[in-house]
Amino acid sequence: MSLNTPSRPADGPASVPALLHLNAKRYANAPAYREKEYGIWQSWTWAQTLEETEALALGLLDLGVAEGDFVAVIGRNRPRLYWAMVAAEMCGAVPVPLYQDAVAEEMAYVMGHCGARFVIAGDQEQVDKVIEIQGELPDFEQMIYLDPRGLRKYDHARLHQYSHVQDAGRAKRDELLPEITRRQDRLDYDSTCVMLYTSGTTGRPKGVVLSNRNVIETSKSSSEFDDLRQSDDILAYLPMAWVGDFIFSVGQAMWTGFCTNCPESADTMHTDLREIGPTYYFAPPRVFETQLTSVMIRMEDAGRFKKWLFDHFMAHARRVGPDILDGNPVSMTDRLKYQLGEFFIYGPLKNTLGFSRVRVGYTAGEAIGPEIFDFYRALGINLKQLYGQTEATVFITAQPDGEVRSDTVGVSCPGVELRIAENGEVFYRSPGVFVEYYKNPESTADTKDAEGWVATGDAGFIEEDTGHLRIIDRAKDVGKMASGALFAPKYVENKLKFFPNILEAVVFGNERDECTAFINIDLTAVGNWAERNNIGYASYQELARHPQVMDTIQEHVEEVNRSVAEDEMLSGCQVHRFVVLHKELDADDGELTRTRKVRRRVIEEKFHDIITALYDGSSSVSTVTEVTYEDGRKGSIAATLEVRSVAVQPAPVRMAAQ
């Protein structure tokens, strides 16, 4: 800690628990958290949230939680689990949220690495996973569960119901409050607020230590950047272990005082989204892609007039909608027609999607297809892009209102400095820069230098005239073709995933003569097409190899090739051959991270026989692949895959200098 970075801010709270105490005073009766349970929305004010959180903190203290302990939190988005993270910090402990869909082995690594003594689990499923691995966790002592269903006959020697822990805390409040108060008073800007594990794209996940300074300063500057207000509503549905959810549902919520709403389940998320109508909304590109696919499927089933009306007004919206949204000049005739479209098409569609009240919307995580991005902005939804990392406490760049484009990720967020290294890698420095990787000084030193500059691992450049950052690809994934042409797989993959029929794509070609690709079909979109055309199928595998499906995917790949060929720098990345995989890439099989990022090295090793067939001229390849079923059992599936060759376009001719 330097003299220029005091442990307490000049004014304002120095920790997240201190922010909660402040909100309980200034917004005492305003809604802080909502949750839908059994079809009914329940609400807690800020004053009630403080009381509930403090009761749990006192109960944790009674159980023996010590300063510096690690407390694992596992489950779906629920107010009580958010309170659990704040309660842990009140005790001077460190909350460590885990991905709720992580398998026991993944949980064992994270809990073993941090040495978690205590676990707060959402339900029986999470309790069972911890019990399965408890023999591998020498530091584990006690577990608290939120939902008691199914747990009545379990051994409760080390198992405690959440509400009972709170009751114990309330009963001993007079005895324990002085100690909790002392521990909270010792918290400052440099105290650890939370530890979040990276997705582990290239190896074991790393524990990213974030301080109160990181969380509060980032929440403050990002809230001011987008004029977030106490009256705003958000829907908390993304994994609690993801840094974005922590900042939106805890950091920014505590800073601004807005209300965090938790859906009943993943199955009811879209219904709950419509009921809440959030004003501030975030989703990764995959969510927006899925919603758009659903809209397009419904329009395919609509009557001829309704389909014509939709196409007619959407064409107009794409032409003038973004300009109207940005406040640019638009003729009165176009404005009137757009208002008519709002009445007939855009308004009802936004209401169906749950976006009627969205004032600020963001997408991040990976690039979104420009056509998808422009579709939502054409509807009048203020959707923008941001660029961030766990190590940055999310925010590195964001798009200011009026400067929104599909091909950039915006300008530096307040307090963030950017620079581009000679090899094109993006570096940043900000108050949000993480403290360290827990128990990993080597990786910390490799990522963050002595001056606080952090290597993102992404390749990009800053536009001289606008200051906007453009990301090309992951630096480690950007390579060269055998011809010396640039190889940037993500650029092509994102274009392929624009098509509703394509769920995932992985492009190969580094140091090779040509590019090839794996394709995953979208079972919902392609299955709907099969149903409309009376095509029967018994499995994903059978549908994926249907000749008409293969023909359609080939058309999509060739259309992408035509688009890629227009880019002089990346024209060498056209796909020459592809296969439609016999299974969906899955996080449980190690092919994707829990945030659904492609693990390229794993895929290259696991499907090496298919990659070989893509490059040796084979017309088909037989393969056997190990898979993990939902109950954790292992199995295998065998398939013979067709290898398709596709048309490629000549590269653009570079004009000679006159």
Image (tube, rainbow, N blue to C red):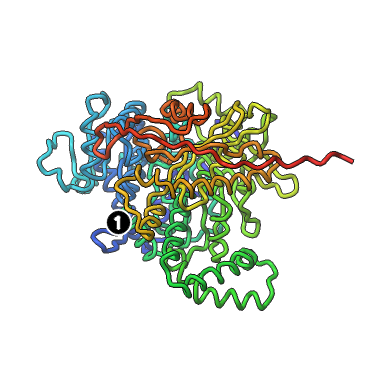
Residue 546 appears in the figure? yes
Residue 235 appears at what percent x and percent y? 40, 56
Quadrant into which the N terminus falls: top right
At a point 33% along the width and 33% down the height, the residue shown is 638
Q: Is residue 156 or residue 67 the one in the foreground?
A: 156
Residue that extends furthest to the right in the rendered view of this protein? 658
Residue that extends furthest to the top in the rendered view of this protein? 442
Considering the numbered disc 1 on the image, is that residue within a helix, a strand or a loop?
A: loop
At a point 49% along the width and 63% down the height, the residue shown is 358
Residue 26 appears in the figure? no
Q: How many marks?
A: 1
Q: Quadrant of residue 192?
A: top left
**Label 1 Cα crowd, 10 Å radius (few <14 / some 14-19 / many 20+):** many
Q: Quadrant of residue 623?
A: top left
Residue 258 appears at what percent x and percent y? 44, 59
Residue 52 appears at what percent x and percent y? 29, 52
Residue that extends furthest to the left in the rendered view of this protein? 153
Q: Is residue 239 or residue 507 the one in the foreground?
A: 507
Q: Relative to 141, does residue 570 appear above or below in the rendering? A: below
Disc 1 residue type (three-letter): Glu
- Report the side of 133 relative to 546 (left or right): left
Q: Is residue 496 or residue 577 the one in the foreground?
A: 577
Q: Is residue 658 or residue 533 the one in the foreground?
A: 533
Residue beneath label 1, please? 264
Quadrant into which the C terminus falls: top right
Q: Quadrant of residue 654?
A: top right
Residue 12 appears at what percent x and percent y? 50, 49
